[in-house]
Image: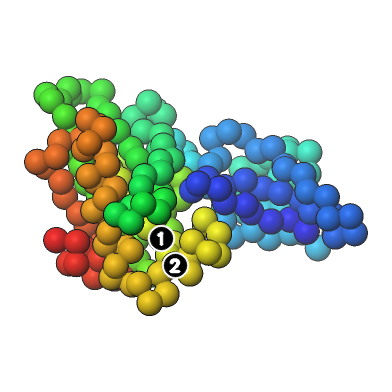
Amino acid sequence: IYCIRIQNGFSSLWQVDVVSGAESQIELPKEYTWLEQIAVHPRDERIALMASGDLCPKRIITADPAGACRVWRRSAPEDLPTETYVASEAIIWPGMDGGDAHGLFYTPQSEQFEGVGLPPLMVLIHGGPTSQRGASFDAQAQFFTTRGFAVLQVNYRGSTGYGRLYREMLRGNWGIYDVEDAVSGARHLAAQGRVDNGRLVIMGGSAGGFTVLKAL
């Protein structure tokens, strides 16, 4: 069995022996930190999937168990240098009740401009509500970082990708944990001196829009 494993918002490709249960990771190029849409060839041991990363727009690739990769299609021209983009950082912070909340943090970066003082923070909320933000190429996050914003992608309690217990914590608590974790995430970064406490912005759509209204 070939499968994708997600840990702290980052993806990896694994092979599982159905007889022994032994697991082994298939090493892909380090630029691929997010994987999806996996498909296995019916005859030979090749895996097709979409791969991307913070510094690499989405591609269709194939890989074999030895890790040999081939790029078949690119979703974008990839004519900007990787230095243009910012790599995300997986962070954990204490929620208002002391429980752990997770997210991905991007620092602002620009080759042309330099900010003064601490940066403003854009807090981005996913929909679902049981969706997630992963370490894929995110043009929205990269847009804001090049314009001086720090960005926090909140994977509040109830998000997928952190285990069943974490996902099911939103049952009966929608509008509570998602809101608290968004607010506490922004306050955590401000308390660490990484963002400006007086310039915090929040944005989201669908279920994320509900969370935005409650957070405000």
Q: Nearer the viewer, residue 49 or 153?
A: 153
Left or right side of 113 for 37? right
Mark 2 Cα shell of 10 Å, populated few (<14), some (14-19), many (≥20): some
In the picture of the structure, the residue carrying the numbered disc 1 is 157
Residue type at numbered disc 1? Arg
Q: Are marks 1 and 2 in contact (CB under 8 Å)?
A: yes
- Picture quadrant where residue 169 is located: bottom left
Q: Position of residue 64 (x, y in %)?
A: 76, 45
Is there any visible trace of residue 74 in the rendered image? no
Q: Position of residue 211 (x, y in %)?
A: 25, 66
Report the label total.
Answer: 2
Determine whether the residue tagged by mark 2 lies in a helix, strand or loop. Answer: loop
- Which residue corresponds to the image point at 40% horizontal and 69% vertical from the top-left? 170
Left or right side of 82 for 43? right
Q: What colour scheme governs how the chains and residues are painted in the rendered image of this protein?
A: rainbow
Position of the C terminus by quadrant: bottom left
In the picture of the structure, the residue carrying the numbered disc 2 is 169
**Marks 1 and 2, the one that precedes in the sequence:** 1
- Which residue corresponds to the image point at 73% horizontal and 37% vertical from the top-left? 68
Q: Position of residue 61 (x, y in %)?
A: 62, 47
